Every structure is written in C-alpha cells, then in structure tokens.
Image: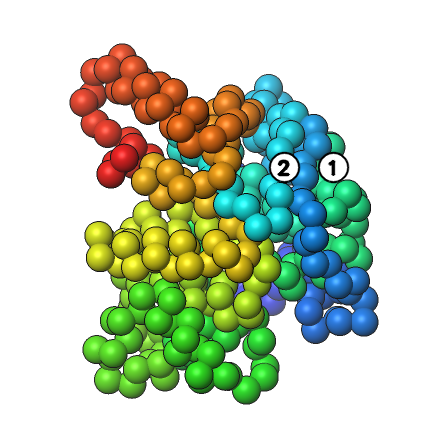
Amino acid sequence: RLVQQLLIMQQQIPQIGPVLRKLEEVDALLPSAPEKAADCPLTKDLQLKNVSFRYPGTPDGRPDALRGLDLRIPRGSMVGFVGLSGAGKSTVVALLTGLFPPTSGKILVDGRPMDNALRAGWIRRIGYVPQSPFLLNASIAENIAFSHWGTTVDRARVQQCCRMAAMDFVDDLEQGLDTVIGERGVRLSGGQIQRVAIARALYHDPQFILFDEATSALDGAAEQAIQQTIDSLRSRMTLVVVAHRLSTVQACDTVYWIDEGEVRMAGTPESVLPAYEAYLAAKNGACGEGTVPPEAQGA
Ligand code: ADP
Ligand code: MG
C-alpha cells in the first residue's frame, strides 16, 4: 500500500506546481495582503461593458456562458436577476464579485477597469451569498466571522448578524454559536446553511451585497425574515439579488432577465416580470408537464 501511495504522489507532483502558483496569485488578492490592495468604495456605479465569459474547458461548439452583457448597477440601488436554470445568473454574480475575470469586455468600478489592485480592494467591500455556500468544519461563530479568520471573533457582531439572518435555530442547539458544524459536527439543513452564509456575508459590513438564490431552500417564515433583512439593507448598501421567487425581485429598481447567456430584457419589475411570467407559462404549457419551475413559485 505504501508503494502504491508513493506512486500516486509521484504522479501528482507535476500538478502541484500550477496549483501552488495559483494559490500565490489568490493570496496576493486576499485581505491579508492589505498593502497591495487599493481601497475600492463604490461611489457611482458598477458596470459591465460588452462582457463575455467562457468557462475554461468548455467543449468546442458550446456557446460562451455569457455573451455581450451590458449592465449598470448604480450605487444604492437594488438590482434583480431572473431566468431559467442554466441561463447564466450565477455566472453574472461571480463576475460582479470580481473573482472571475471576463473572457472579453470590461468590468468598471466608478469607471475604473477592474484590475488586480482594484479587485483586492473590491473583494473587501462586498458580501457574497453563493448559491451553494461552503461551510468549514468549525463552530457556527467562526463560520460567520470567516471574513476575519484568525482574529478574535466579535461575539456581539456575530449575534447581530444571526438576528439579521433569522438564525433562530441556533437557540435550540445545546452549544449555541459554539456548535461545531461540518464533517465532524452537526449537519445543518440547506436552509440553515443558507442563513449561516447570509450572516457571514453581513459580518464584515459590506457596501455591496450579492444574494445568489439565497432564499431558495427556506420555508415561508425564514424567507419572510430574510426578505425583511434585505429590505432593511436597502438604505445602507447596493444589492444584487438572483431570485428564486419572483416576489423577491418585485421591489428591485431594475430587473435583468437573463436567457441563454444574454440579457433578454431589462427594466423596471413592472415591465420585465409580466413578460417573464408569460414566457414561463407558455413554456410550461408547451412542455405539457404542468410543473411550475422553481423560479416561478410563489410569484
Ligand atoms: P444559472 O445560475 O442561471 O442557473 P449558471 O451561471 O450556473 O446558470 O450557468 C450558466 C452556464 O454555465 C450553464 O450552461 C452551466 O452549465 C455553465 N457552467 C456553470 N458553472 C460552470 C463551471 N464551473 N464550469 C463549466 N460550466 C459551467
Ligand atoms: Mg445559479
């Protein structure tokens, strides 16, 4: 068995070099390297200009995941994205975080192109609730204070974020915020994980927050609580919401309907949502399945 393991290790050594180099690249972007980061407050708007994105390794003949995207998110606004599963919503959000550089086109923060120096500052200003959040094998409090990993956890701040994220389930845990979750700890439900991710995104008081289907696994009461939090954040930050339920984007200033990697329609919710709903209804009718896609539930 030992010889076998040694062989495997030897085979893998060539792959390790590129991974380590990539990690060094990422390290240079992290908040732990503050001297390299230019501060990046949003004062005017975030813009995508003619942005296309292709995932590395996409087979020939498959189109780019995003094509020719133009959009503008003014500071202090709330912008929603709707579209079928696979349309490209999560990819747009990933581009807005600055973590994915576009294949072509530009991302502009206050008119300045997003380069590495700017990206490092931008990352410190945003809160990102991914569609599939990743929790560490650590306590709930440490998971929430993740953006300040390695420093003392600010318990009062964690508690405040828990309230905003409707994390009342913590009260039922014997060890409360110190409960260890993950591989060797308590298993949380999808909806509970989503709420930990929301609390985590709020912990470092972002200026710009992105919710990627953050309420899709929540029941009615928890969803309502999160909706209230989103409403209360509106006056303080810029929000991007990928919606699972159309009711969530009803209050947005602008809604983008993403369809097969392109903006199919953009405008006020009153102008975009009826067209999108009609499209969903026609699509369901045509399929003859009689099922309501998750995007349309609760609309
Ligand atoms: P949505 O969030 O609207 O459901 P996504 O942005 O996740 O859509 O996906 C858009 C397209 O990009 C889909 O065709 C999907 O298969 C593809 N895609 C998403 N993530 C990856 C990835 N990591 N690697 C390759 N292709 C991906
Ligand atoms: Mg998605």
Q: Position of residue 95 (x, y in %)?
A: 62, 43
Which label was assigned to residue 106?
Answer: 1
Q: Secondary structure at mark 2?
A: strand
Towards the viewer: 12 or 275: 275
Q: Position of residue 44 (x, y in %)?
A: 69, 47
Say whether disc 2 or disc 1 marks the residue closer to the N-terminus: 2
Residue 193: which quarter of the image? Answer: bottom left
Instruction: Tell me which amino acid carries mark 1.
Output: Lys
Side of 286 relative to 58 (left or right): left
Q: Secondary structure at mark 1?
A: strand
Instruction: Tell me which amino acid carries mark 2.
Output: Arg
Q: Position of residue 143 (x, y in %)?
A: 45, 73
Which label was assigned to residue 253?
Answer: none
Q: Which residue is mark 2?
A: 72
The residue drawn where x is 31% and y is 66% is 166
Side of 291 relative to 11 (left or right): left
The residue drawn where x is 25% and y is 78% is 171
Residue 294: which quarter of the image? Answer: top left
